[in-house]
Amino acid sequence: MSLKVATDDKHPSAGAKAYDAIKAMILDGRLKPSASYLEAELAEWIGVSRTPVREAGLRLEREGLVKVRPRRGVLILPVSAEDMTEIYQLLTALEPLAAELAAERGLSAEQATAMDNATTRMERALAEDNLVAWAEGDDDFHALLVEASGNKRLIEATARYRTQVHRARMATLSLRPRPEQSTVDHRVLLDCLLKGDAKGARDVHVAHRQAAGQMLTELLAQHRLNNL
Amino acid sequence: MSLKVATDDKHPSAGAKAYDAIKAMILDGRLKPSASYLEAELAEWIGVSRTPVREAGLRLEREGLVKVRPRRGVLILPVSAEDMTEIYQLLTALEPLAAELAAERGLSAEQATAMDNATTRMERALAEDNLVAWAEGDDDFHALLVEASGNKRLIEATARYRTQVHRARMATLSLRPRPEQSTVDHRVLLDCLLKGDAKGARDVHVAHRQAAGQMLTELLAQHRLNNL
DNA sequence: ATGAAAAATAACGTATGCATTGATGTGTAC
DNA sequence: GTACACATCAATGCATACGTTATTTTTCAT
């Protein structure tokens, strides 16, 4: 399991298909940052008409992944260091709220096992030095945390930023030090959630996010990774 | 000056026109909560074709104002007490961040006068018992505050929720006690911003948002206002 | 009379066509 | 040789037409 992309698997409407396809192509690098693509060519690649492609383009524009420019196609926006700073500021405000709410609310049995599972996967992946697997576990953990808050708007808002973080994170995976502390943080946070310790959960997660944000932005600055 | 709605006044594209028109009709009550409207009729009222109306509908759906249901038209979603709880949780996380960032960053001369202006209007309106004018000043103040944070994503995220708060607030304006403390809060916050006191700005605004949220949700519960 | 099934209707989702408009290339004049 | 203007072209934005599908109505059978 990696990043969730699909909107509705039941009836793959052309609109959803276009959105998912373009988003996937951006995330895995088939559409290159700073390059432009015409609606018509995207439509042909995906196998739908221009209408759903246009729909997807506007949606992705609202999500900050692309910019549609009159007569110049959709521009794949690179993720800059400033973007990551903005995003981490938001996530540092939003996810600790999620942690607090989740702790107050309590985890369901399924949620508890799923989060424990994700944490264990991170610990195992770290021991085996499998950083990609570690990042996947981390993504899942954060998604589950926000889900557990029960605040639908919070879930929706953070999902939007997670896709952009994903790109920066993948680029820096091999550059960063081993995420020892980060992995421990997750286990501690999960304990707080299980105990219903809302304040503890919030505090742990604020620290976690601040450290992660600082590390990432420093890495991006050091390596001049300004166009992901 | 009231809520900003327009996206681009220069070249009123049909898409923007449809979006602005529908949003305005929702906010001023011409489209009633819990009622449905067909794309075709909206298109005719606005004077564009179905395509931009559909575009606007999808956008408003993402923003949580409507739900488009296959063959049943766009449903104007009522704002429930739970919605307001969710929204105030988010705003209580986001706006204090904005206050902190704005204080660190400092206000430009224009920003400072605009915010002082808004605050003065609130104080005057309160003295004259003009609650509608008071609410407008309050809206403007909060919009300016978030603008001053300089975080584009933060600006965009809060703008989304402000429209929904607007509806609930208008409904409760005459029910709530006179917003004495709230008005003072704004002046105090502005002082913190001008002094560059980031921590003070954050703390004042957290308290402000928590109080406002609690008051509003209690009012909604007391008066059983569950479908705005 | 009631219920079910089938046909008709109506609305959306998608495709396509057209007009508008910005970009690009060429030609001419200085 | 360079710069500006005009013409051509191409891609979007919007409108419209079509096909799909859910809903509703009507009819028939029990």
Image (spheres, coloured by chain):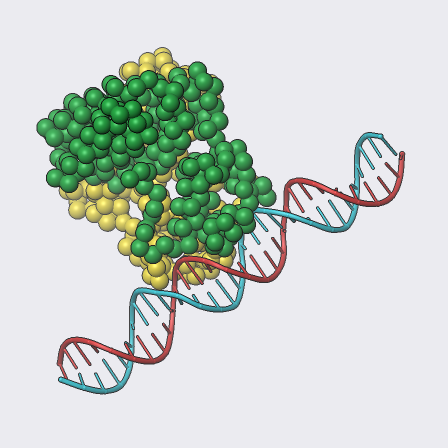
Chain colours: A yellow, B green, C cyan, D red
Furthest-left residue in this view: B195
Q: Position of residue B115 (x, y in %)?
A: 19, 34
- Left or right of A133: which side holds A8? right
- Left or right of B223: which side holds B187? left
Camera sees residue B210: no
Q: Name which quarter of the figure residue A169 lies in.
A: top left
- The residue at 32%/51% (across/down) is B8
Q: Name which quarter of the figure residue A39 lies in.
A: bottom left
Q: Position of residue A216 (x, y in %)?
A: 22, 37
- The residue at 21%/42% (across/down) is A82
Q: B30 or A56: which is nearer to us?
A: B30
- The residue at 38%/23% (across/down) is B174
Residue B10 drawn above or below residue B78: below
Camera sees residue B129: yes
- Left or right of D30: which side holds B171? left
Q: A13 or B166: which is nearer to us?
A: B166
Q: A119 or D28: which is nearer to us?
A: D28
- Left or right of B211: which side holds B33? right
Q: C23 or B110: which is nearer to us?
A: B110
Image quadrant where one finds the N terminus of chain B? top left
- The residue at 17%/46% (across/down) is A224
